[in-house]
Each structure stands twice: as C-alpha cells, then as structure tokens.
Image (tube, rainbow, N blue to C red):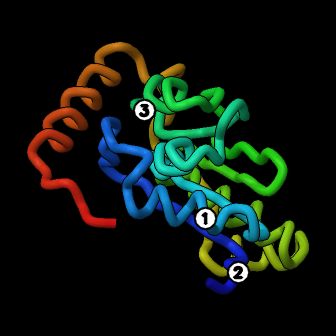
C-alpha cells in the first residue's frame, strides 16, 4: 500500500456502537503511521478513536458525541479545532472550514490560507449566537438532541 499524505474522515451519523474491526477503522489504523496528517471533522473522530489514533490525546467532535468520544479513549475537547502532532480534529461540520484553513496554512503558508478564505468568502457573521452548547440554551440543545436522535435512529448505517 502506498503512503497517504492527508486523511480526512468526515462525520455524519456515525454509529457509536461500531467496532474496532470495521473496515474503515482497520484501514485508518494501517495508514496512520505513514500519513503527514490524519484528520477528522464532526463525528469522524469516532473512527479515529476506534483506530487508536486518539488514545489519550485531546480531540474535537460534534458536541452530541463528545461523551462517546471519551469512552473510546480520547480526551474530549470543546475547541473547534484541535491539533496534536500530526492529528487534527474539528468539532461540528462548520468547523471543518476552520480545520481546512488551518491545514492549508501549515501545508502552504498563511498567505495561501488567507487567499483560500477570501476565495470562498468565508467571513462568518451568524445571525444568532447559538453555535455551541455553552451559548445555545437548554431548550435549543434539547431540540437539536431530539432531531439528531430521530435522524440517527431512522437512517440506515452508511457503508464506509
């Protein structure tokens, strides 16, 4: 198998009861030693944790799966982007843009990352300040939890 440079594991409704024998988990375990960067966005970090990549290190994940992430050996972080050595994890989906820009700066320089930011017109100005559980309030958190649980239980697990 040839070496991989940058691995990005996307998130979604990852099955928290998955196994260490999942084909994607086995593949991540095999390729991680030779990557330049092993990264994830959202619940993609659950796969990295199952592969042993996050054992004992800080890692980000969607807030709704932080407890599961901790049960898999990682140290859950509420930061949007966490970099530990060559492992980079991002919280929810929108933080994937932050991760992408961070990696672009490390791989190609800050000016290139700034150019990418401008090219995609990434200038967040959200209409509400409810982008994290610390800011959203209990009613909004409960609504999101209900929606995520309903969506996760009604979907067929996706093949890796």
x and y, in percent, of residue 45 in the image:
53, 47
The percent position of residue 107, horizontal first and vertical second, equals 84, 74
Is tag 3's residue or tag 2's residue first in the polypeptide sequence? 2
Where the N terminus falls, by quadrant? bottom right
For label 2, the residue is: 3
* Label 2: few (<14), some (14–19) or many (≥20) C-alpha neighbours in 10 Å: few
**Residue extending farthest bottom:** 2
- Would residue 2 appear left or right of 128 to someone viewing this image? right
Which is nearer the N-term, disc 2 or disc 1?
A: 2
As measured in the structure, the alpha-carbon distance from the residue carrying label 3 to the one carrying label 2 is: 30 Å
- Name which residue lies at 60% across and 48% down: 90
Question: 103 or 84: which is nearer to us?
Answer: 84
**Is residue 104 shown above or below 136?**
below
Task: Rate crowding at label 3 as few (under 14), some (14 to 19) or many (20 or more) other CA atoms within 10 Å.
Answer: many
Q: Which of 112 and 59 is in front in this view?
A: 59
User: 72 above or below 10?
Assistant: above
**Which residue is farthest top?**
138
> Residue 30, which numbered label?
1
């Amino acid at each position: 198998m040839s070496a991989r440079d940058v691995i990005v594991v996307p998130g979604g409704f990852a099955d928290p009861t998955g196994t260490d024998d999942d084909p994607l988990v086995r593949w991540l375990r095999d390729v991680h030693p030779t990557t330049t960067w092993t990264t994830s966005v959202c619940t993609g970090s659950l796969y990295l944790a199952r592969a042993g990549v996050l054992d004992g290190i800080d890692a980000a994940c969607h807030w709704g799966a932080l407890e599961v992430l901790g049960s898999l050996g990682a140290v859950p972080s509420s930061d949007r982007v966490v970099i530990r050595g060559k492992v980079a994890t991002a919280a929810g989906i929108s933080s994937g843009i932050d991760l992408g820009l961070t990696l672009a700066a490390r791989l190609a320089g800050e000016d290139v990352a700034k150019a990418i930011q401008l090219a995609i017109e990434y200038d967040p100005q959200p209409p509400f300040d409810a982008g994290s559980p610390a800011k959203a309030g209990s009613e909004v958190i409960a609504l999101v939890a209900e929606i995520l649980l309903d969506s996760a239980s009604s979907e067929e697990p996706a093949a890796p």
